[in-house]
Image: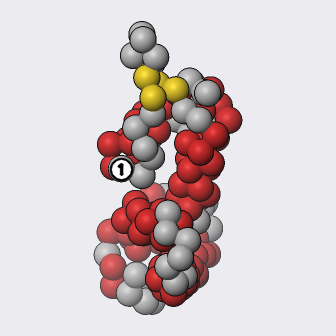
Amino acid sequence: MFSIGELSKRTKVKVPTIRYYEEMGLLAAPERTEGNQRRYDAAGLERLSFIRHARELGFSIEAISSLIELQEHPDWSCEAATEIAVAQLADVRAKVKKLKALEKELARMAKGCDGRGLSEDCYVLASLADHEHCEHEH
């Protein structure tokens, strides 16, 4: 059995986040000692590791909840899990596309100013003040 502090150390998930996951129903409420301290078993540790990994991959709380439900029903089809992963992949790809456009625009802005002039003539500041200086919508 693990205290919440020990669970936090082992999973690298902060204590308030563990409590939040309990409140959201992602992590089952643990047993309590006579002193009302939480005690987690190996299944709690495994579940929290699952949640942490899913969060690192960008899955939403709702998606993780659905994935946990699938995990708890090993006789169900994994089609829904695949759909959730495909949706997350599409979201990540959209973010990467947007970040690449932002990178290109920022590089163009930075290149437009040599950094040696006065701020009143700074292309970076002018670009930030007036979106018309940008080449693309972002």
Question: Residue 51 at what x, y percent from top left?
Answer: 54, 54
Report the side of 44 relative to 24 (left or right). Answer: right
Q: Residue at x 47, y 83 (%)?
A: 80
* Residue pointed to by mark 1: 25
Front residue of 32 and 137: 32
Quadrant in the picture for residue 6: top right
Quadrant in the picture for residue 82: bottom right
Q: Residue furthest top?
A: 35
Q: Residue at x 42, y 11 (%)?
A: 34
Q: Residue furthest right?
A: 10
Front residue of 78 and 61: 78
Front residue of 49 and 138: 49
**Regarding mark 1 in the picture, which secondary structure is present there?**
loop
Front residue of 3 and 59: 3
Question: Residue 25 at what x, y percent from top left?
Answer: 36, 50
Relative to 132, is 10 above or below?
above
Answer whether residue 27 is visible to the viewer in this image. yes
Q: Residues within 10 Å of mark 1 (few under 14, many from 20)?
A: few
Type of amino acid under label 1? Gly
Report the side of 19 relative to 53 (left or right). Answer: left
Relative to 47, is 104 above or below?
below
Answer whether residue 133 is visible to the viewer in this image. no
Report the side of 57 relative to 32 (left or right). Answer: right
Numbered disc total: 1
Question: Residue 2 at what x, y percent from top left?
Answer: 60, 27
Q: Residue furthest front?
A: 75
Q: Residue at x 40, y 81 (%)?
A: 138
- In the rendered image, which quarter contains the N terminus? top right
Quadrant in the picture for residue 29: top left
Q: Residue at x 49, y 79 (%)?
A: 76
Question: Residue 67 at what x, y percent from top left?
Answer: 48, 68
Report the side of 2 relative to 18 (left or right). Answer: right
